[in-house]
Amino acid sequence: MNKILFVFSIVSGAALVLFILPLLNLFTQFLTITNSLHEDWAVLLRITFFTCEQALLSSFVAGVFGCALAFICFETRVVGVKVIAILSHVTFFLPALIVALAIVGVWGNHGWVGKFFPESGVYGWLGILLGHLFFNFSVYFRLVGQSLLESEKSEEKVALSLGANRWVVFWSVTFQKIKKSVIQSFFLVFIYCLSSFVIILILGGGPRFTSLEVAIYQAIKVDFNLKLAALLASIQLLFCFVAHLFSGTASEVRIGFRPRLQELIYQCRTGVGEKLVFAVTWFFFCLVVLLPMIYLFVKGGTSISKLSPNDILGTLKFSILLGLKVAIVSSFLAFSSAYLARHFRSEKVKRWVSFSSILPVAVSNMVFGAALLTWAPSFRDLGSEGLWGVVVIQALSALPLSFRIFSESFSKIENEIYFSAKSLGASHSQLLTQVELPMLKKSIASSIVTGLGISLGEVGALLLFESSGNATFSIWLFRLMGKYQFGEANAVGVLLLFTMVCIFLVKESWEH
Amino acid sequence: MIKVLPFVLLFYSFFRFLGATSLVKSDSLNVYTYDAMMGQSGFGEVLKKVFEQKTGAKLKLVSFGSEGEALNQLVIEGEKTKADILLGIDSSLSSRARATKLFAPISKELFEGLDPVADLGSDRLFLPFDFGYLAFIYHKKRLSELEVSGQLSNLREFMISKAPTKRVVIADPRTSSLGFSFLRWTQESCSNQKLLQQCWELFAPKLTTIAPSWSGAYGLFLQGEADWVLSYTTSRAYHLEKENNDSYNILIFKEGHGLQVEGAAVIKSSKKRDLIQAFLKLLVSEEVQKQLPLTQWMYPARQHTPLPKSFKDLPNPKAISFSNELSEDDRKKLLVDWIKWVSHLK
């Protein structure tokens, strides 16, 4: 085994141990004393059923919207694709409470759109689906969009020249090419929706919409019933595991919009048709994504002046510094794992490395945080004011996405390049520094941005571990809400949104 | 350079771990509390400033997401905890906190001069420092006087009345201490289980939604999503004081209002008796107590503490404190029943 492989194995192994041991410690509590649980099993069963039901429906609805949007954006020339692409990155990372309130501002009884439909009401299935659609359409948009961008159009051209119409060509040729990424996105979104909490509580409208995550919250944070929490987390993990098996481990995520010259088979042939596609696309994008964001801007924009510049700068500095720590740790871990998955000879080991790197997606930060604290209570004192706990949890939650970014890029480095470099006498370290790292520059940027984005929007780990009173934008926002200052909280939401858009723009410009 | 980067990071991490700041300092007091106390204009900051000025010792506030999480952390750490005080424990958590046996009784003289309604038990394990009355808040422009007067004089009647204004938003008792206190208030207001069930079943269709926290519920109310929101009587004071806005009013029940009391508890294993005593004395002193209304938006527990004008003008309802403390099993059963009663929401 070469030295680099050895070092990266140690790093990935240590991360895996740090992830697995606290969880094992939590789960053993449940395995050893299950008979002392006095839970209402019928209620538990109903909660489990609803959790799966809403996750399936939400994944389906987000899929229809996300795939349609990706297809229209990448297969036709709709004006404003870049704006859609940038905004779709941001939605994924916003704090759920501010999004839920923004959705209510648009779709609620007195909302911009909702007031025209007073009888329908946003609370219930409509709210849950809208909330999950806002967060998760971007997963489809990115994965399916990337597949569309990378697929050759020669087969479609042949089919068209043989007289097939465009619907037939789409279903029999293009859809077959993107089918895998559609399925992967579906299961990824399904896993995210399984651990949904705030959206279901606020937009669901009451306890008849109780998900497993709500029950876990109650077990961990209110009752401190770790046995029940472990049982519920096990059920959640089981579903995630099954979803993961279905979705496969192949990765196709690449964050960022990279249009390339290609023939547009599905472009409308008439000007009217093009305008219609443009209007329909933007109409639905506005309804689902843009209006809640505009609502946030309108409500928060006027209150920005109420925030002290010193507070803004202090929070920005703390948020970015914490985000960078998270981004560096998660990128390093993800790079190590992707390197192992690329260079290990055994297929079995490769599969395990891939699986363990995306495992954290199946465990919510709340469960992992509780497991970590129970396993090692002193973790809260490590680093400056418990910051290491935050970094560990946030980095692990960014790991699956970063891993996908790196493993995708590694898989694109052709074997011939390795053979050529080796035949010229390159060592493993030279291969890494002079071949792989330069070729993975864009992936490193993507991974850093992902880590930053996750850290900026995350709240749970900070509330659990950070004890100094320092605040990121998300925490500041929650504190303001707790003190009646909802206008100012919206203003902080605007700043958070603005910071995220800036980060993505910087990344985009750097890449080009 | 790039070759050594991973090693530099590893070493950096290792030394940061080694250099972890310790909570244990003889001239400092470690206080576990919840996040809402933190921040620049928070009560925690006021307390820290005054304590450090008066004693010369450091006050380290360690914040958690909620008071329940702070208690959980203490349970995890047990007697080895580095905390000296738990600040912010409320009536809904007191029975669970008592059961941990982690807390020591507080000297009797500190309770002198405190408002009798701010009661957290006769065993003196929790020193009350603030309290608030639960209440339904409404916007004058959205509800007419007639509609409000039609809401009758006690909570039970408000819940079952057939008034045209239906839209109410409350906090979830499973995830919010305010929500749980409200559930307890309904329990006190309804004399038996059957009546309680009936009240909730009739109240459920009036609920626009049940938010996970007070801030979620109040945010929805301010957006116009509900006519009524479950909050505190002091919410009106906030709008008067900070926004000069008289539009938010309180529905007062003659029968009385549920009470939420917050207190501080001393960790039995702590050796810093003098600092703890100084802290608690300061906590209930007039100097600190008078800061409470405009930082925590709660009433100070010390009687005759000067109040800002916005608080003086508030109605002073009769307090309904929850007479019997619920055991853990009863608390869980109540929540399970509640889910069944309100699960038939439209």
Image (spheres, coloured by chain):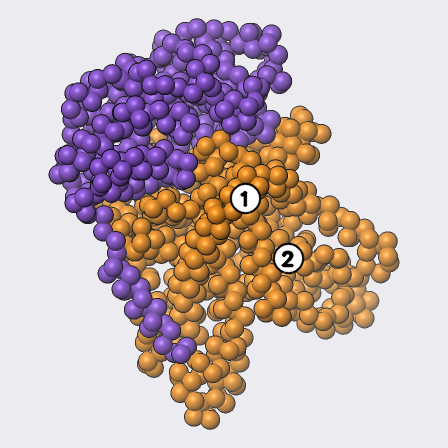
Chain colours: A orange, B purple
Which residue: 43% across, 20% down? B308
Residue A103: % across, % down: 60, 38
- Quarter of the picture holding the N terminus of chain A: bottom left
Above or below, A59 against B205 in this view is below
Q: Which mark identifies residue A85?
A: 2
* Residue at image mark 1: A493
- Residue A469 visible here: yes
Q: Chain of mark 1?
A: A
Q: Chain of mark 2?
A: A
Separation (CA) of disc 2 from disc 1: 20 Å
Q: Does residue B183 appear to the left or right of B303 in the view shown?
A: right
Q: Are marks 2 and 1 on the same chain?
A: yes
Which residue: 39% across, 76% down? A344
- Which residue type carries mark 1? Gly
Q: Earlier in the sequence, mark 2 or mark 1?
A: 2
Q: Does residue B223 appear to the left or right of B293 in the view shown?
A: right
Q: Nearer the viewer, residue A287 or A380?
A: A380
Q: Say which element carries label 1.
A: helix
Residue A468: % across, % down: 34, 46
Residue A333: % across, % down: 39, 66
**Count the marks: how many?**
2
Which residue: 86% across, 58% down? A270
Please state which of the two labelled residues, at mark 2 or mark 1, is closer to the viewer: 1
Above or below, B55 against B209 in this view is below
Which residue: 82% across, 53% down? A275
